Structures are given as C-alpha cells and as structure tokens.
Image (cartoon, rainbow, N blue to C red):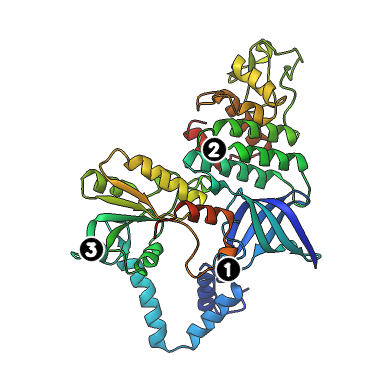
Amino acid sequence: MIAHQAEAVVLRTWPLHEADQIVSLFTRDQGKIKGVAKAAMKSRRRFGGALEPMTYVRASYAEKPKQELVRLDSCEILSSPLSHPVDYVRAAVLAFFSEVLEDTLPDHDPQETVFRLLLAVLEYTRVEQPWMPLTYFALWVTRLMGWLPDLSRCVFCSVPLTGAAAFFHSQANGLFCAQHKHGGYSQLSFDSHALALRVFRSPISALVTEPWPRNRAVDLRRFALRSLERNMERKLTTAAVLSRLGG
Amino acid sequence: MSRFAEPMSRLIEELKKLPGIGAKNAQRLAFHILRSSADDARALADAVRELKEKLRLCSICNNITDVDPCVYCASPTRNQRLVCVVEEPTNISSVEKTRSYNGVYHVLHGTLSPLHGVGPEDLRIGNLLLRVQASEVDEVILATNPTVEGEATAVYLADLLRSAQVKITRIATGVPAGSDIEYADEVTMARAMEGRHEV
C-alpha cells in the first residue's frame, strides 16, 4: 500500500453501495485517478463538502498495486466553488469544466498545464462573469489537447487571417479564409478573432477587468465548443445547456 | 444456461435492478423469499403492486401520496401559507423530524443539473408558481441541498418568485449540532460565521 498526498480538483462523484462514493480526482502529480470514499455520504467528518465537483483539495489516498481504484482517506478543502454565490449559469460552466476534463484526460497521466489552466479559470468563474472563463477554458483546453491549429492563418492555404474575415465549420479544425470557405461555414467576427489571438497571449487575469456580457464573443465560444465536441467525438451535455443559456 | 429455475432467475434479475443490490445479494434475497411462507411472499408482492397502483403525486405539492391532496396539503392545522421547497419527497421526513415546522411543502423532484442535462423544464415548478401567483403563499423557504446544484436551483427559484409578493428565504447552513468545530471545513465554517445571530 502506497500512501499519497496530492493537490487535486474533484471532477465527479458517483454513488456506490449505501453510503460510499466513487470520486474522480484530477491530481497535479498523477493526473486523473479514481478512488473510493468510504461512508462519504453518511459521515461528513472526513470529507465534509470537499467532494463537491470542482473543489480544489489536498487529498490523502492510498494506492494498492494492481488495483484501479485508490482508497480516498481524506480531503482538505483548499478552495471551494461554494465559497462564492452560485447560479444556474455558473453551475453550468463548472459542470462543463468537469465534463470536458472527465472525458478528455487519460488516467494516471500528469497534465500540469491543464491543471494550472483549471485552477486559473476556477478562480475567475463568478456569477458576475461566467462567460469569459468559459471561453478561455474552451479555447485553451482544445489547444492543450493538441486539437487546435494556428488561428492566425487559414488552415487550407496558410494565408494570414489578421485583419481579414475568418470562417469555421463544425466538421473542420481551425479557421479558413474567405477563398476557402464553402457552404455551411460560419463567420468569426473580427473582434472575436482578435480576442482568440489575445486569449493565447494573455493570462486570464489580464482579461478579467474587461466587461464580458453574455453576447460578447458568442461566435468564438461556439467555435471553441464545436471544436471540442468534434474532437471528443460526442455531444457535450453541458454545452447544450450553455447554448440554451446563451453561451 | 441459467444455474437456477426460470422463476428464480427472473426474481434475481429483478432484484438486481434495485439500488445497492448486487448479484450475490439478489440471490440471497430471492432464496429468503423462496424459504418464507406463502403468506409472507404474497404480502411482499401485494405491497410492491399496491405501491405502484395506489401511490401518485399530490396535485398541489408533488409529494408522493395515496390520497390527493396529500396529508400535509389537506391538513387544517398546518399553515398553508408557508411553503418549504425540497428536492425529493424523502427530504420531507428530515424537516418533519424537527417537529418545529408547521407549514406545507413543495417537492421539485430533482435539482438543476447541467451535467445530467436536467434543466428547469424537468423540475416540477409550475404548480409552485401557480400557488404563489394566486396569492396563496406568504413565505417560500428554499430548502434545497447546499451543493452547487442545490444552490443554483435555489437562486433560480428565487429569481422566478421575486416578482410575486412573497417572502423568499433560504435555509441556514453551518456547523452541525453536536459536532466539533475542529472538523468543520472552511466553507461550512464561513457560512456559520455569516449566519451568526445575537444571543
């Protein structure tokens, strides 16, 4: 039995037996792992509210050789989504982070950059400003997974797209110039295209001071979400909810 | 080919569908039923059948009941103008255990859950709005769980009800009675401090 202590973010939980839970954790050191939290639903002493999805915790767990599930012993909350007000949109954005990472991260494969990205967006996902962290996360996670080509050039002819119209399609990666777009392509506005390039050059803290109402960069969010869904090869439940909410 | 006779296999398969019942437990329960008297087995079958035939949702509060309206909504001694909104019918018994609440209930049958695709249209909100709009209610207590989904649901309902002339309150959260502050997590403790009151 090997004992571990690691920083982690709770991705999801599933009920197991009467009062146990299976917990999916995204740890900084070991990547995504799954473990059993015994009596987690009955006794609040060891876990309290720490197993709420998107809670940043210091997790203590024990690993047995040749066993897929670790034994989760305790979780100390470092930061909780419940420390700030929650509404339907913020809940949907947090659920989106959870759904994407649960599906895309391989087990036991550390992903330091994705971990840092998640902590950064969690810090800024607030009721007052949910759309910016959502867009930032969707674009960056697509890039970090290696699914996003250079957005400054047409993927077909490599002509620079700066200052020119850019187009995207739900079935194709990257952006296209006006010459290589076909039927069914959507235009990415100048503002949204410039914003996408800024997202990859700036830390999230640089964007947080800007007003980001629901209708800002809707096309960019749609482009990022469609890119994710295409590469994940499935429709995201939370993306559908966010679309209904205006995202 | 099954190891058991067909009726036994069928019962085991049905019992396995119950939450928390695995193959071994289902087998154990099925053999227990086989060994019990015919009267006991019939009583169990009748209880299951009656559960499905007689139980329905209260047309006022959505609680599970055998009479419509349910005992709470029909009670003349209860304050019908005070409504406690809960996620599931099982939550009612937790509030009733306090013996200090004398209002009625409204059961949502779930919470907003983006991860499971549960939106406002999937919750039973309509008859709550009707009650409030008909000015039949003075106060709505939002008693959803203090989780992200429960909080989101409470805020969503509060926004919906805000236009009506009704007092909207949220249940308090904090350190459980009889527990030790040492074991309270930061969120619970912060909320307990926020919700402090003068003594």
Q: Taking the image as drawn, is residue A155 in sight?
A: yes
Residue under pointer 3: B78
Question: Between residues A72 and A58, which one lies in front from this camera angle?
Answer: A58
Q: Where does label 1 land, which residue?
A: A17
The residue located at (63%, 26%) in the rendering is A207
**Which residue shows up at 48% across the image and 58% down it?**
B174
Q: Position of residue A240 (x, y in %)?
A: 52, 37
Mark 2, Cα crowd under 10 Å, few <14 / some 14-19 / many 20+, is many
Q: Mark 2 — residue? A: A126
x and y percentages locating residue B80 in the rendered image: 22, 57
Q: Amino acid at mark 2?
A: Arg
Tag 3 secondary structure: loop
Nearer-N-terminus badge (2/1): 1
A42 vs B169: above or below: below
Please give the name of the residue rendered at 32% of the width and 60% of the height, measured from the top-left corner. Answer: B63
Q: Is residue B73 above or below residue A113?
A: below
Residue type (three-letter) at the residue carrying disc 1: His
Mark nearest the camera among 3 and 1 is 3
- Report, in whole angstroms, how far the alpha carbon at label 3 lies from the one at label 1: 37 Å
Q: Residue furthest left?
A: B76
Q: Give the chain of mark 2.
A: A
Q: Residue at the location (78% across, 48% down)?
A: A109
The x, y position of residue A166, in whole percent, is 65, 16
Chain name for mark 1: A
A125 versus A159 height, above or below? below
Badges 2 and 3: C-beta atoms under 8 Å apart? no
Q: Looking at the picture, do discs 3 and 1 lie on one chain?
A: no
How far apart are the alpha carbons under marks 2 and 3? 40 Å
